[in-house]
Amino acid sequence: MRGRVLVIDDERSMCELLEAGLKQGGFLVAARTSAAEALRVLAAEDFDAVVTDLNMPGMNGADLCERIAANRPDVPVIVITAFGSLEAATAVIRAGAYDFITKPLDIEVLALALDRAVRLRSLKEEVKRLHIAVARSERFHDLLGESPPMRDLFDLIARAAPSEASVLLIGETGTGKELAARAIHAQSRRADGPFIAINCAALPETLIESELFGHERGAFTGAVKQKEGLLLKASGGTLFLDEVGELPLGLQPKLLRALQERSLRPVGGDAEVSFDVRIVAATNSDLEEALEGGSFRKDLFFRLDVIRIEVPPLRARGNDILLLAQRFTEECAARTVKKITGISSAAGAKLLAYPWPGNVRELENAIERAVALTGYELLAVEDFPERVQSYRPSEFLAVSDDPAAMAPLAEIERRYILRVLEAVGDNKALAARILGLDRKTLYRKLEKYHTGGSRERDG
């Protein structure tokens, strides 16, 4: 069904003609022979569009347009008139009509106009729904989502937050692990204390020890004054260790001892200093693989991995993509003082189809670009990066009844494994779990396919 349409014409034969033609075109049609009857029906039932004759006894089509525009502005009205003059067109458009069509009537032209009107109404309803959803949705300390994976995440955070246990957040880059860490802190008994974050991959090995533990004056070249470490600065609150898998191996036993003893010795210092922090760590790599390779200590891993919480990738969150896109659009439009209300339906379909390997961060950047480039109130497909516009999901099976076109089982397996890897952004640990394979088996198959199945990237 292309939409539900109310037809109004004082001639019953014309109503029957329009009803038959539009039904054949896929519309569900109701007909009335007066504007007064039409208004009563519109007050009780919902329609996607209205088609009305202009010249009718009593209330004419223009007056009916004004009444509908005042009481049901969401319903587009198309006016049929025998007078194709500019004055007639201007009058009905001013009265609130979506479009007007002149007689003699071409039912196909009317059907196309109705199709456009119904699509426009549907788009406006979706934009309105997203506005409301963004305003009322479950904002979990800046995390936004209504999908089942996000509801599961909110539930885990709510249950883990009151505990003093260490939390390990796992997930791909750009999924919002730091926002999840802040949500845990905000709901904990330490909410009034500091939340301090450090990216373990952003600092050279020579500096990260000083950042965490602090140092005494003269402890090394350049240490011109005493510095308090982040473990002490975060005392009474939460210390967030981002990219904890990049922590230098030589520093790991010192951190483990400090966490166990709740005391530390600054670099170059002689005395132990007590501290009180809760540790929330995050990684986008496979720490269990790092344990096997010897680049991460098992004792520190088990100290951090008390409560494990997985932050889902954006591609697993369904319509959350549109919800986030709407919020980012509103925020970017407000910053740039541009009148942009939302995203076109075609652009929305592209956003839902694209796999977002960079997750929420990539989506936010794409929306910022689109807002900067668009000249319209709705973001269109062409406003987004080329990779989003041109993306087509790959097919791993060819549908054919021709035995000559059918692939061997080994080839089907190869295509499917590579399709799963593409879908999860080349996260081999996640792909192995989806495929039901252990990591070594997956690596062996990838090496066989000559696709670079080395272990340099697992997250």
Image: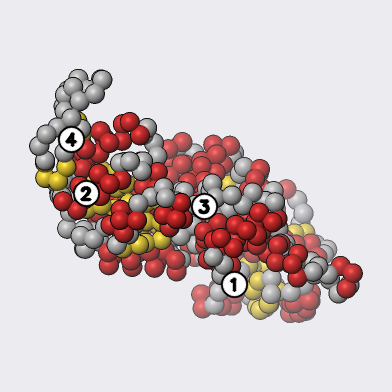
Label 4, label 3: how far apart the Cα atoms are: 34 Å
Residue 446 visible, this orientation: yes
User: Within 10 Å of the Cα at label 2, are there few (<14), some (14-19), or many (20+) other Cα atoms?
Assistant: few
Q: Is residue 239 left or right of residue 79?
A: left
- Foreground mark, 4 or 1? 4
Could you say which disc has been placed on residue 266 in the image?
A: 4
According to the picture, the residue beneath numbered tag 3 turns out to be 458
Q: Going from the N terminus, do you reach mark 2 or mark 1 first? A: 1
User: Within 10 Å of the Cα at label 3, are there few (<14), some (14-19), or many (20+) other Cα atoms?
Assistant: many
Q: Amino acid at mark 3?
A: Asp
Q: Going from the N terminus, do you reach mark 4 or mark 1 first? A: 1
Give how far across and how far down residue 324 sits, in percent: 47, 54
Q: Amino acid at mark 1?
A: Phe
Q: Residue at the location (27% across, 64% down)?
A: 160
Q: Secondary structure at mark 4?
A: loop
Give how far across and how far down residue 251 sits, in percent: 30, 41
Q: Residue at the location (21% across, 43% down)?
A: 231
Label 2, label 4: how far apart the Cα atoms are: 13 Å
Q: Secondary structure at mark 2?
A: helix
Are discs 4 and 3 less than 8 Å apart at CB?
Answer: no
Q: Amino acid at mark 2?
A: Arg
Q: Residue at the location (59% across, 72% down)?
A: 47
According to the picture, the residue beneath numbered tag 1 turns out to be 47
Q: Residue at the location (56% across, 70% down)?
A: 436
User: Within 10 Å of the Cα at label 4, are there few (<14), some (14-19), or many (20+) other Cα atoms?
Assistant: many
Quadrant of the frame with the N terminus: bottom right
Label 3, label 1: how far apart the Cα atoms are: 52 Å
Q: Going from the N terminus, do you reach mark 3 or mark 1 first? A: 1
Q: Is residue 334 left or right of residue 428?
A: left
Q: Going from the N terminus, do you reach mark 3 or mark 2 first? A: 2
According to the picture, the residue beneath numbered tag 2 turns out to be 257
Q: Going from the N terminus, do you reach mark 4 or mark 3 first? A: 4
